Image: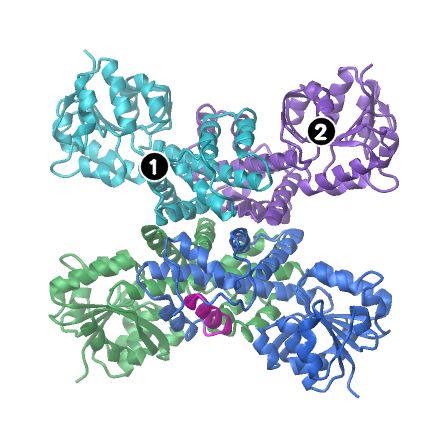
Chain colours: A purple, B cyan, C blue, D green
Amino acid sequence: MKPRIAYLGLGGMGAAMARRFLDAAFPLTVWNRNADKARTLVDAGARLAATPAEAVADADFVFTMVSDDRALDGIALGDAGFLAAMKPGSIHVSMSTILPTTARRLAEEHARAGSGYVAAPVFGRPSAAAEGMLWICVSGNDESKARTLPILEPLSQKRVDFGLDPGGANIVKLSGNFMIAAAIESMSEAFAFAEKNGIDPAQMNDFFGNSIFACPIYKNYGRIITDAAFDPPGFRLALGRKDVELVAETARINAVPMPILSTLVSRFAARVAKGGGELDWTSIALDVSADAGLPPRGKA
Amino acid sequence: MKPRIAYLGLGGMGAAMARRFLDAAFPLTVWNRNADKARTLVDAGARLAATPAEAVADADFVFTMVSDDRALDGIALGDAGFLAAMKPGSIHVSMSTILPTTARRLAEEHARAGSGYVAAPVFGRPSAAAEGMLWICVSGNDESKARTLPILEPLSQKRVDFGLDPGGANIVKLSGNFMIAAAIESMSEAFAFAEKNGIDPAQMNDFFGNSIFACPIYKNYGRIITDAAFDPPGFRLALGRKDVELVAETARINAVPMPILSTLVSRFAARVAKGGGELDWTSIALDVSADAGLPPRGKA
Amino acid sequence: MKPRIAYLGLGGMGAAMARRFLDAAFPLTVWNRNADKARTLVDAGARLAATPAEAVADADFVFTMVSDDRALDGIALGDAGFLAAMKPGSIHVSMSTILPTTARRLAEEHARAGSGYVAAPVFGRPSAAAEGMLWICVSGNDESKARTLPILEPLSQKRVDFGLDPGGANIVKLSGNFMIAAAIESMSEAFAFAEKNGIDPAQMNDFFGNSIFACPIYKNYGRIITDAAFDPPGFRLALGRKDVELVAETARINAVPMPILSTLVSRFAARVAKGGGELDWTSIALDVSADAGLPPRGKA
Amino acid sequence: MKPRIAYLGLGGMGAAMARRFLDAAFPLTVWNRNADKARTLVDAGARLAATPAEAVADADFVFTMVSDDRALDGIALGDAGFLAAMKPGSIHVSMSTILPTTARRLAEEHARAGSGYVAAPVFGRPSAAAEGMLWICVSGNDESKARTLPILEPLSQKRVDFGLDPGGANIVKLSGNFMIAAAIESMSEAFAFAEKNGIDPAQMNDFFGNSIFACPIYKNYGRIITDAAFDPPGFRLALGRKDVELVAETARINAVPMPILSTLVSRFAARVAKGGGELDWTSIALDVSADAGLPPRGKA
C-alpha cells in the first residue's frame, strides 16, 4: 500500500499538490487554517483533520506549505504542534519559503523527536503544480531524502539534491526568488526606458522572450507587466516582499553585499507603504513607470 | 546579380557577418582600421579597400560595425567620410551599438545626401554570427527597411521591425544589453549569496539554467561566471561599460530613473578603475564575490 | 543626600559617564562584564558589584550602556536579571543604541515590575562624555522623565524630550547615526572624486569644514578619513554596522524605503566580510577609494 | 582708479554680486540675456551693454555667472563671443557651475587669445552674496589668481586657492554640491523614518541642527524640508539636477563609483520626469515621503 500523506496548508500551491497526491492514489489527510479551502479535496476523497496534530497522527510523510516562518513554527511546535504528534520514522517535507536558519532549527527538533526533516521548496506556479510540473530542490540527511524523493515524483518534472544542510534547499529557493524579483525590476526599468523612447514594451518583450531571454520568467512576467495584469495576483506582492526580506536577513547574517537586492528592498517597501501589497508582485513596475513620469500602462 | 555589399569594421562580429555574405555569394568589399584582420576574408574572395570612402563607392548596401559613436562618426562624416561617397539610393545598414541620438543625426545626413539609413543592431555572439543565427532589430524608413530585410537573412534567424524612428532599434539594443548586464549582476549576487551559505554556484546555475531561467543569457553567462572563464573575453568589459553608459546617457536625456542601471554604472566603473577592463564583462562577478569576502572562484 | 546610581556597562562611553557621576558626588555602584574595566572607578570611590542584580539593589537610578539589544536583555531579564531586583519606584535610564521595539517591550516589563523606564540615548564621543558635553534625547512617561532629567545634567550640554513613546528617543538616535553614516559615505565619495581629479581631499575637507559644513560630524570625521586614522577606532565599524542594521530592521517594520541606507547596508557588510570590522567606522572610505582605483591614502 | 568690471549673467547670484561691485565703487558694465533684470543695477549706476562682446570691451575683469556649460560657451565663443573682444591681459573670472573639462578648454582658448582665465565658483545663497559673505574657490595660473583675489574681497568672507588646474575649483564646487544633495536626501530619508515612527521631523531637525549637524546646510535645508517651503525655490531643482549630472559625467570620465550619487541621479530624474523641476531642489523630500506612504507634509 502507498505511504500515508498529510498535507498542511492548502493555499493555491498546497491545494494543487495535495490534489496530485490524491489523483495518484495516496491515502491523504489534509488540514488548513480555513477549512473551507479543503472542501474540494474532501469531496475527492481526502480526510479532513481538525488540527495539524490530528492530521499527522498516522502519516508517513507530512507536507507543509504555509505562508512564512512564524506560521510554520505555529503549527509545528508547542504542545499542540504536529511535530510531537508524528510517528517515529515519519518525515516532514517542508515546502514553504522560509529562512535557512528556521529549517536548521526545525531539523534539529525533528532529530530529537525521532522524525525526519527534508527541505523541499518548489519553483513553479499553481498551474504547474496542478500538472505535476514543478521543479523541487531538496536538502537534508541522505536517508530521509532517499525515502522522500520518489514521493515527490507526482508533483514535479525535476528534483535536485542540494546536499546535507537542511537549510541548503532554502538558500537555492531564496536565490531563485531574488533572481526572479531582479528580473522583474530589470524588465520594468527596460520597459520604462523603451516606452519613454517611443518603443512599445509589449513588442520588445515579445522579441526578447523569443530570443536571448526565451525562458518562463521573462516570457510570463514580461507579459504580465506589459498587460498590466496585476489583479488578481499570481503571487501577492506582500508575499514577494516577505521573500525579498528573507534574502536580506540571510545576507545580513552572512555579510553578503547585494546592491540589486537593496533596490528590491526599497521597491517592495514602497509598494507596501503605498497600499499595493495585494496586487501581483510584478506591480513594482507601476512605480518604475510612475517615477519615469509615464501614464499608467493599460490593458489592451 | 546580387547587390554589392561593403562591410566596414571587421572585429569578431563584423568579420563573421562579412564571411556570411561572402559564403552567400554577395560581391563584397571590406575595410578595417587594421587591415590585417581582413586577410582571411580577402583570401576567400573579398576585395580590400584602402579607405571607407573607397570601400563604398559602388556598394548597394554599406554595413558598419564599429566600436562606438565616435568611431562611426569618424568614418562616416567629413570630407574623407564614406557617407559622401555612397551611390544615390544605396543604404547604410548601421549595426554598431550607438546612441539613438547618433542614429537619428546620421539618418538625417543620409537623407540629405540621397542615401538611406537603416538601424540594425544585432543580438548574439560571434559564434552565432558565424552560423547566421543572430537576432536583428531594425528601424528606419519603410522603403529602406523593405530593401534591407532580405539582405539580412544570411546573418540571422530572426529580424524584427521596431518602427520608423532610426533610433528605435538602438533603444531595443540598449534595453537588451542593460537587461543582460542586470542578469549578470543578479547572478553574481545570487552566486555569492549561495556560496557563502555552502551551496555550489555551479550546481545552482545548472538547476536554474534548466528550469525557470532556461535561456541563453542565464545558461551561458552563468557558466562563464561559475567557471571564472573571463579571459579571453567573449565581450570586453570596457565595451560593456560603454553600453551601460550609453543607456545612462539616454536615460538622462529622457529622465528615466533606473536604479539597477545605477548599480551597474558603479560596478563597471569600479572594474575599469581597478584595471579589469580587458576581461569579459561577466567579470564584475569578481568584485561581487570579493565584496562578500569570498576567495576567488577558480577554473576547474 | 544625592540619589544612588548604578551604572551597568563600562565601555568607553559608560566609564566616562560613570566617572562624571562620581565626580559630582553621587553614590555610585558599577558593574561590567569584564570587571577589570571598573578598576579606575573603584579606585576613585565607586562600589563594584558582582552581578547586575546586586548592583541595582539600592539604586534610585539604574543606567545601562551596553553593546546591543541582546546584551541588554541578557542583563535585564530572567531570574538573574536586574529588572526584578530594582527597588519600587526606581528608574532604568537606558542609554544603549537599541531597537525602539526593544525599548517598548522593556518599558512594559518595568511598568509591570513597579519601576520606571526612560530611554536616554546619547550623541557625542567618549571625550565629550568625559567633559559632560553630550547631547541626550529622552523619551518615556512624563513623571519618570521629570525625575531623570536633572540627573542627566552632569553628563550633558543639552537634553531634549521626544515624547511619551519609550522607543521615541531611540528613533532619534537611529536617525542620527544613519545621518552620520550617510555623511561618512558622502564625504568618502566626494574625496575619491576629488582625489582622482587632482584635488587634495584634506584641503577640500578643511574648506568645507569651515564653511557650509562647519559642524562636528564633517570636521572630525572628514579629518579622520583624510588622515586615514582608522586605528585605533573611535567607534568600531562592527558596532556602526549594528546600528545601520537596526535602522534597516526598523525601516523594514515600518516600510520606509531608504536608498542611502541601502548603500550603507552593503558598504558595511562588505567591510565586515573582508575582515575590517575592528577599524573605525569611517574606514568604509577605504573601500570607496579602492573601488575608484586609488592607492591607499596614507597617514601623514 | 579701480579696475573696470564687466558682469555677464544677472540671475539671483549674479545680480547680487554685481551690486556688491557697484557698492564698492568699481566701474561696472553689465549684460544679461533678459535685459529687464539689469534695470535695478542700471538705476544704481551700472552701464548696460547690448551684447557680451560690447560689455567686455574695456573691462579688466570679466565675470560670468550663467546657467550651464552651453550658455557659457554660447556667450564666450564664436565670432560674436566676448572672448575675442577682451582686452589683452584682462581676466575672465568664471563663476558658473560647469564641467572641469569645459573650464580647461576655455582656459586654453583664453591663453591663445592673450587673456587670463580664473575658475571662481562660489558657495552661498543670494542673501549671502548680497552681504558679501560667499565662500569662493579659485584655481588657474598663479599670476591671474594673484590679480583676481583682491577683486573677490567685496563678495566673500573667504577665498581658497585650489591650485593651477583651471578645472580644479570646479571639482571642489561639484564635490560640494554633491555633498549638499546627499545631505538633503539623507535628511529626507531620516525625516520619513522618524515621522513614520511618530517623531516630529521638525523637532528632530532642530535637535540635530543645534548639535552634531550645527552647520548651515543641515539647519537651513532641514528647515525648508520640514516646512515644505519648496516654492518659491531658493535653488531650482532642475538646476540642482544639472549639477548632479555634471558630477556624474565627471565621475564617468574618471571612473569613480559613487553609489550615493547614483541614488541622487535617479531621485532628481524622477522629480523632473514627474514635473517638479521648478520647485526647490530640497523637494526631492516629497518623493522620499510619498514612497514611505506618508501624506504630504504641510506648512502650519
SS state under label 2: helix
**Residue A178 drawn at (x, y percent):** 57, 38
Question: Label 2 belongs to which residue?
Answer: A12
Q: Chain of mark 1?
A: B
Task: Say left or right for A59 vs B23.
Answer: right
**Residue B291 drawn at (x, y percent):** 49, 48
SS state under label 1: loop
Foreground residue, D262 or B221?
B221
| Residue B145 placement: quadrant | top left
The span picked out in magenta is: C214-228
The kind of residue tagged 1 is: Arg
| Residue C178 placement: quadrant | bottom right
**Residue D95 drawn at (x, y percent):** 29, 67
The kind of residue tagged 2 is: Gly
Report the residue that reaches farthest toward the top. B1
Question: Label 1 belongs to which residue?
Answer: B236
Give the Cα distance between marks 2 and 1.
45 Å
- Quarter placement of the C terminus of chain C: bottom left
**Residue A233 drawn at (x, y percent):** 64, 33
Residue C220 lies within the magenta run? yes
Residue D231 lies within the magenta run? no
